[in-house]
Image (spheres, helix red, strand yellow):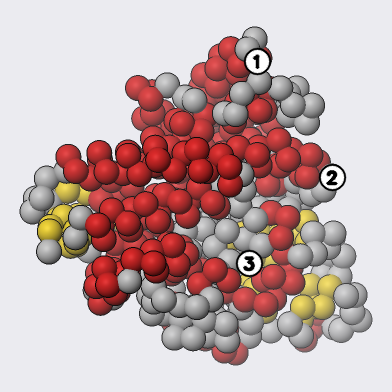
Amino acid sequence: MASSMSALDRAISPFDVSANALYVEDTWRERFARLRAEMPVSFCPASPYGAYWSVVTHDPVIEVELNPQVFSSSHELGNITIADTPPETSLANFIAMDPPRHTEQRKVVAPAFAPSQMQRHEALVRQRMRELLDRLPRGETLCWVNDVAIPLTIGMLCVMFDFPFDERADLKTWSDWASNVQPDRDPAYQAAFLAEMQRMLARFDTLMEQRRAQPPSDDLLSRMVHSQAMGHLSPFERISNLALLVVAGNDTTRNSMSGLVEALHRYPDQLDRLRAEPALIANAAQEAIRWQSPVTHMRRTATADYALGGQVIRKGEKIVLWYISANRDEAVFANAEAFDVARDNARRHLAFGHGIHRCVGARLAELQLAALIEHLVDERLRVIPQAAPTRQASAFLHGFTAMPVQIVRG
């Protein structure tokens, strides 16, 4: 709703919660807890990303998500991350659009993630999970991120794209480039980014032209080229949507898989509970996603003045929805810091967003996590950290770069 409240009344945040150090050092919890308690909607007047509003509790995040008319995702107004990227690298994919174009393009890819399609992939997910984990050594140190989480998610991405499996390393490279949100990108970085995206486009264009010459099928590339909404995108629009799908299919799930290991290490009784009550596995997957919150934030831009949480957001201002904090909101999730596989409302998490922009691949992520938990339970495996993990230097993706572990039976 519009308001005539004075902008001078705005609550000024004592913290810049966009600082990468908070996530590298894993020290973000206390600052968000204070903001939730004292100022659920607050304004940060200066940061490496410029001024921005923070929304840190559950219900106001939902209010923003359910009002895309006022809170725009459009790449033309600022895109979906806290960074204000130059136009030439501000990816114009369907998540960074408002209706009706967003709706038209989302409808093209959504059927690839429908329940019927997920049922088709379920056996393959479990098979690959089993094959990978069974061939890993027991009682020897390995990297969970590089040896387990990345191979599993990249392998599934190859299935969804029908992408050559022997070229899977390229998918990780492109995902890492596309998801790297930083405040200052110098010209050399910009050039390298665009060169890598052009390389991605060239490879995918070859694959898409092959699909165009074939009858429509269920893989993502075929759906795109045989659709009215996405069959004739410009080169930059193709880059943008491919980058989105690669990042969504890789980074978020791999970070949830690694977050699961950390959660079970901090709360070891929860694995014992799952062994005793395997019916909780599907809920445990939801809880792992809530607890990790692999996407730290999403950004919107106000198209009109709006009163939210006692504050007035002005037209043109940047609003950052901190999913990582909303998923710790004690008003919704009792004892929110705890990892509780029996949490009765774990599905209310906002890790995938809410409303029209809710992650189209959410069900696939849930399926992969549930399969991983199921395998750990069935084979009576424990994943034991051997040293502190290293974490991504990012205020956008909440994840890990390395996690030394040993896999043991018992």
Q: Amino acid at mark 2?
A: Pro
- Please identify, in this view, whether the residue under mark 2 or under mark 3 is nearer the observer: 2
Q: Are marks 1 and 2 in contact (CB under 8 Å)?
A: no
List x then y, in percent, for residue 149. Answer: 33, 47
Asked where in the image residue 202 lies, by quadrant, the reply is top right
Examine the rendered structure and indicate whether residue 221 appears above or below residue 366: above
Q: Which disc, if any, is residue 166?
A: none
Mark 1 — residue? 215
List x then y, in percent, for residue 95. Answer: 68, 47
User: Residue at point 66% right, 42% down?
Assistant: 110
User: Residue at point 26% right, 61% down?
Assistant: 377
* Left or right of residue 403: residue 78: right
Q: Circle 3 sits in a helix, a strand or a loop, which is it?
A: strand
Q: CA distance from mark 1 to mark 2?
A: 28 Å
User: Residue at point 33% right, 58% down?
Assistant: 373
Q: Are marks 3 and 1 in contact (CB under 8 Å)?
A: no
Q: Which quadrant of the figure contains the C terminus?
A: bottom left
Q: Which disc, if any, is residue 100?
A: 2
Q: Which disc, if any, is residue 321?
A: 3
Mark 3, residues whose alpha carbon is within 10 Å: few (<14), some, or many (≥20)? many
Dot 3 or dot 1, earlier in sequence? 1
Mark 1, residues whose alpha carbon is within 10 Å: few (<14), some, or many (≥20)? few
Examine the rendered structure and indicate whether residue 5 appears above or below residue 292: below
Q: Nearer the viewer, residue 403 or 210?
A: 210
Q: Amino acid at mark 3?
A: Leu
